[in-house]
Amino acid sequence: MIWKNETILREFVLLGLSSDPKTQVALFILFTSVYTIILIGNFLIIVLVLTDANLHTPMYFFLSNLSFLDLCYSTSTLPRTLRDLLSINKVISYGECAAQMYISLSLGVSECVLLVIMAYDRYVAICYPLHYTTIMSKMVCVRLAVGTWMSGFLLSASLVTLTLKVDLCGHNKINHFLCEMLEILSLGCGNIILVELIIFIAGLIFLLTPVTFIVTSYVNIIVNILKIASSSGRRKAFSTCSSHMMVVVIFYGSAMASYMKPRSSSLPGTDKVIAVFYAIVTPMLNPMIYTLRNNDVKAAFIKLITKTESFLILSCL
């Protein structure tokens, strides 16, 4: 990437969420607490799914993938944000900025695809229960998971490459706490309509299309749930699906608010506030939503605690 006057660009300056020192300290304490919850919550789900045989099902396999995605996504952004909150020098090198942009975008796109697969899994489980184990076989689940990760990293490579080729117009200050693709584009000069159009089309494919598919799937799911004779069966089905829908609304809602609106309608600072939801809040809420509303996960957690206590007691004897 180069300046308009052909000077080679070597760094950016992240302006962050606030310039007030007291606010920065408060945000540091808050985000440190949130990051700790993200690490513990998502790591716990991965451990539970790996160690409890009752959770060796497609639904929990994809849930563990979601937890791993959230761990990676938050780690690609939050440590740098925490450092900047206590630092006067918020300069980020060109290479680090490009890497953060690529990794976070790749993981974000992968999560978009994964949430669709999780909706499809629930659709098959509720609408075609007799064929569920055949349709969602172990090999199919592995292939879907691999495809999820590949789609994110392959698409993001092309979008980030296009973004980094845009020439800048006189300054390198990014009004954000992350190296976001749209924020880099906002510094661009000349005709960047084509790049913005490509990003908008990518948003249609990986945001609006998945939401349409998920909504359609859940309409069919609700119709089939209402046909279940057992009230306890209906409650369990609704509980599982409502957890997924809460995640979908938070993640897709904030992502669409950021990536699928005209740049001219953006108010200064609003994009970084929206980014807090999909970059920080969602990875924190996912484990809470899936554990507090899921009896299977809670039972696996209690079993793990019991085993740990027994092991510690035996070790002390």
Image (cartoon, helix red, strand yellow):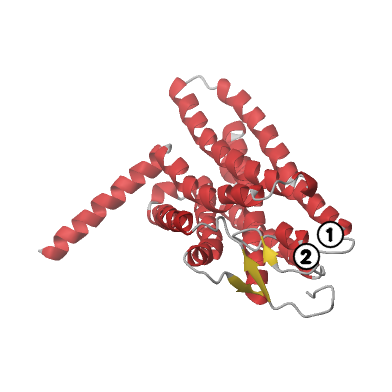
Residue in the foreground of this view, choosing between 202 and 151 = 202
SS under mark 1: helix
When asked about the image quadrant of residue 99, the answer is bottom right
**Residue 23's x, y, as percent?**
47, 54
Q: In this view, does 218 lie above or below 106?
A: above
Q: For the point 85% across and 53% down, which residue is it?
A: 197
Quickly name the residue at label 1.
195
Amino acid at circle 2: Thr
Q: Can residue 146 be seen in this view?
A: no
Q: Are marks 1 and 2 in contact (CB under 8 Å)?
A: yes
In this image, 277 relative to 182: left or right? left
Pointer 1: residues within 10 angstroms few (<14), some, or many (20+)? some
Of the 4 image quadrants, the one containing the C terminus is: bottom left
Q: For the point 81% across and 70% down, which residue is it?
A: 165
In this image, 295 relative to 6: left or right? left
Of the 4 image quadrants, the one containing the N terminus is: bottom right
Q: For the point 66% across and 29% down, which residue is it?
A: 220
Q: For the point 90% across and 61% down, which residue is it?
A: 191
